[in-house]
Image (tube, coloured by chain):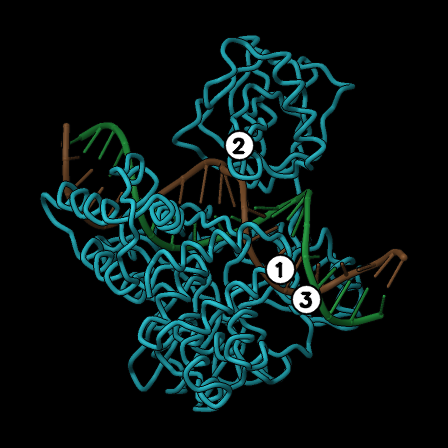
Chain colours: A cyan, B brown, C green
Amino acid sequence: MLLIELARTSTAVAADSARSAKIRHLAELLGRVEPGEAEIAIAYLSGVLPQRQVGIGWQTLRDLPPPRQVATVTLGWVNERLDRIKACTGPGSQAARKALVAELFGALTAQEQSFLSRLLRGELRQGALDGVMIEALAKAADVPAPEIRRALTLRGSLPAVGAAALRGGVDALRAFRLEVGRPVAPMLAQSAPDVAAALARIGGPAVLEWKLDGVRVQAHRSEDRVSVFTRTLEEITAQVPELVEAVRALPATDLVLDGEVIALRPDGRPEPFQVTSGRVANKTDVARLRESTPLSVFFFDALRVDGRDLLDLPAADRYAELSRVVPGRLLIPRLVTADPEEGTRFFTEAVRQGHEGLVVKSLGSPYAAGRRGAGWIKVKPRHTLDLVVLAAEWGHGRREGKLSNLHLGARDPETGGFVMLGKTFKGLTDELLEWQTRRFLEIAEGPTDNWVVTLRPELVVEIAFDGVQRSPRYPGGMALRFARVLRYRPDKRPEDADTVATVRSLMI
DNA sequence: TTCCGACAGTGGGGTCGCAAT
DNA sequence: ATTGCGACCCCACTATCGGAA
């Protein structure tokens, strides 16, 4: 199949806003792709690469060679070129890689260049990724969508599952099984403002578990072979030897466990997320770092124990199996209750001990992997500050032509100025976006056609955030984590805004 | 007819590995 | 040694579609 056919389908998908129409376009193409190229077509049209990543990003794609007039390249050819680019490493690789990218894009028409460029940048912007692709595959292969979702959970790769569905229908999908050593798509959580709201959504007794601010891990063990994966199914076995040893010491030899790995201080309180994250990401100095920054692991679910798959069992039964093979010191602290007051006390205690909050879980839910079902609900405390808008950046995509991303500052009484604490684009409605663009252009200082538009510091905005972290980038040495706009405060003047001292007092 | 679940899009800060400077 | 890029860790929120209620 020619790449141009995918590019045309993508254009058609983007042009129709109705999901049903997007599904029709995708299914039509999937219906005529040859089996050997099905995985590539499914991957590209759901916004992923079979190679996962190839080392090409926004900067590499800035200037492309002039396009061809006639479309000639096939999916197989393009994919082979991407393999070659991915394999390009070592001294001199940047120039070689650049040449390969130029050669690849030089063989494409304008429409193909646009498609491949958006795909490689991870911004397909066609209003369809895995969710819509699952429906399209269901239509093209004439199988129920839940069968595809189930297989995807167990296999973790939509191209592989989708190609099997097109080739062999329901029978092929049912052949996918949980396989020890191959990661499962992890179950995700929704969020709620407080414990009472979370309990109300579950509607009955629930399990409340501490939410640790670490890295999600899925640990597999077959005999003495242990492998560990992250939320996105990256393998990190070599970076977490403490976890490997802990799993190897368990009294069961055939296991898949779900948990969180975290760096704790000697007094048992958690290190800031940055410390855990840095430790887990490090590959070159693991032996030394495990002395200075040891990792602890806490498990909260079991997907397989002693050769028995548990995904379809209710959470309470899975936990019973988990606690049978994992000692208490490796289990997340938990409480079963339906009482909002008791739950809130548990929440307060978790936060007092330095943790992120709670995850509230239904006792009856199966392990609904890969979807943010209502089975798990996270609850975290929320802080707010009144800050001053120092500048704004022009948006992209559906925010093109709108001033979108705000630069936020706290008041510095010593200098009479403001100290930047970070940016945010979250929490804005279309109406607010419209309003702030007009308002910002009125108080702009200097040119308004640059990427960043500097403003007179006049507007006060109420910002919600999860915490203050150390920052190597911002002038005050601190930055807000997960900042989002709650509302503008026209009743407040910049001299009423919160000060850097207030922010510093919140830093962990 | 209204409500709500699921999805896609729009980006945030921090850290590491790697190649180039 | 420092810098820039890509990848990945953590992630919140709104708009929209279409099926459920």
Q: Earlier in the sequence, mark 3 or mark 2?
A: 3
Query: Residue at coordinates 46% horizontally, 48% vertically from top-left?
Result: A273
Percent x, y of residue B3: 83, 58
* Residues under numbered marks 2 and 1 in contact, where contact means CB atoms less than 8 Å apart: no
- The image quadrant where one finds the N terminus of chain A is bottom left
Mark 2 neighbour class, 10 Å CA radius: few under 14, some 14 to 19, many 20 or more: some
Mark 3 neighbour class, 10 Å CA radius: few under 14, some 14 to 19, many 20 or more: some
Q: Earlier in the sequence, mark 2 or mark 1?
A: 1
Mark 1 neighbour class, 10 Å CA radius: few under 14, some 14 to 19, many 20 or more: some
Of residues A355 and A390, the one drawn nearer to the viewer in this rendering: A390
Q: Amino acid at mark 1?
A: Arg
Q: Which residue is mark 3?
A: A374
Question: Residue A19's mark?
Answer: 1
Q: Earlier in the sequence, mark 1 or mark 3?
A: 1
Of residues A330 and A275, the one drawn nearer to the viewer in this rendering: A275
Which label sits in the foreground, 3 or 2? 2
Q: Which residue is mark 2?
A: A395
Percent x, y of residue B20: 14, 35
Residue A210 at least partly seen = no
User: In the picture shown, does residue C19 fall above or below A278?
Assistant: below
Residue A259 at least partly seen = yes
Element type where label 2 sits in the image: loop
Q: Are marks 2 and 1 on the same chain?
A: yes
* Chain letter of the residue carrying label 3: A
Of residues A90 and A279, the one drawn nearer to the viewer in this rendering: A90
Q: Amino acid at mark 2?
A: Gly
Q: Quadrant of residue A385?
A: top right
* Chain letter of the residue carrying label 2: A
Percent x, y of residue A471: 43, 33
User: In the picture shown, does residue A156 fall above or below A396?
Assistant: below
* Residues under numbered marks 1 and 3 in contact, where contact means CB atoms less than 8 Å apart: no
